[in-house]
Amino acid sequence: MRRESKLELLYFNMRGRAEAARLLLTIVDAPFEDHRVRNMQHWGELKPQLPFGSLPLFRSGSFVLSQSHAILRYIAGSYELLPSSFESQSVYDEAHLALSEAQEDLWQFAWRKDYVANPKAYAEGRLSHFLENLQSHLIRHGGECWVGNSISHIDCLAYVLLDELRAFFPTVLSSFTSLYEFHARFENRPPIRTYIDSGRRPVVFGMALHGPKIDPAANVQPGEVFENPWTEPVPLA
């Protein structure tokens, strides 16, 4: 990545698949324009122009990249956050794939009828199974960070997953001590804490069967709405 290049990240006005990239760019102190698609007209015009018809989209000067995990790895490599040896890179890839699998499962669960009716069964079953394996990986390979003592895109991806659990499955998260402590440690890194407190972080995690998943810890103002490209604006309070 040419450091003088203008960096742009394009996504919807929610955390979703772009939040890990936002966090990583914040960690490396890279100024970037955080563009957000907020209405149906903009999305309708934009979608046919996208490489895979989906977001996020990342630009570094004339270089354009889609697919959230490719974007994450590109940013990490550009700022020399990836290890040089093949074996070490494989440990990062292993963590990346395991975290993304757990994240996708959590997001898919949000579209099932029992997301509201019976979340306990999911929490005690599939979710706990994923978290047991993730905690084991963290204990085997982690230190101050998810892999060793160097910050990377893996930390950002892990935080996005664990922070959604903090919001909607807090009891489950707190029962996995190493994951709970990692979440707190990452969240209190000065650049991340500044971002969280800035008001720039989207209030909505993503969409679910019953509408937007609103962070219960967010400071929602009276009359505030979620502007999105699929429906009319949704009141947040």
Image (tube, rainbow, N blue to C red):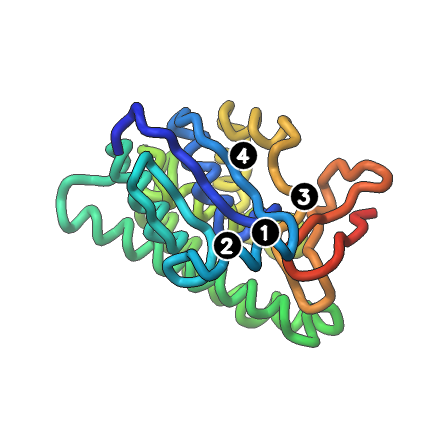
Considering the numbered disc 3 on the image, is that residue within a helix, a strand or a loop? Answer: loop
In this view, 45 is above or below 178: below
Q: Which of marks 2 and 3 is in front?
A: 2
Mark 4: amino acid: Glu
Residue 215 percent across, percent down from the top left: 69, 47
Q: Nearer the viewer, mark 4 or mark 2?
A: 2
Q: To which residue does mark 3 refer?
A: 203
Tag shown at residue 42: 1
Tag shown at residue 46: 2
Q: Which of marks 1 and 3 is in front?
A: 1
Mark 1: amino acid: His
Mark closer to the chain start, 2 or 3: 2
Mark closer to the chain start, 4 or 1: 1
Spatial separation of the CA atoms under disc 4 and disc 1: 33 Å
Residue 210 percent across, percent down from the top left: 73, 66
Mark 3: amino acid: Val
In this view, 41 is above or below 221: below
Q: To which residue does mark 4 refer?
A: 187
Considering the numbered disc 4 on the image, is that residue within a helix, a strand or a loop? Answer: helix
Contact (Cβ within 8 Å) of mark 1 with mark 2: yes
Q: Which of marks 4 and 1 is in front?
A: 1
Considering the numbered disc 1 on the image, is that residue within a helix, a strand or a loop? Answer: helix
Mark closer to the chain start, 1 or 3: 1
Tag shown at residue 100: none
Q: Is residue 132 visible?
A: no
Residue 128 percent across, percent down from the top left: 54, 64
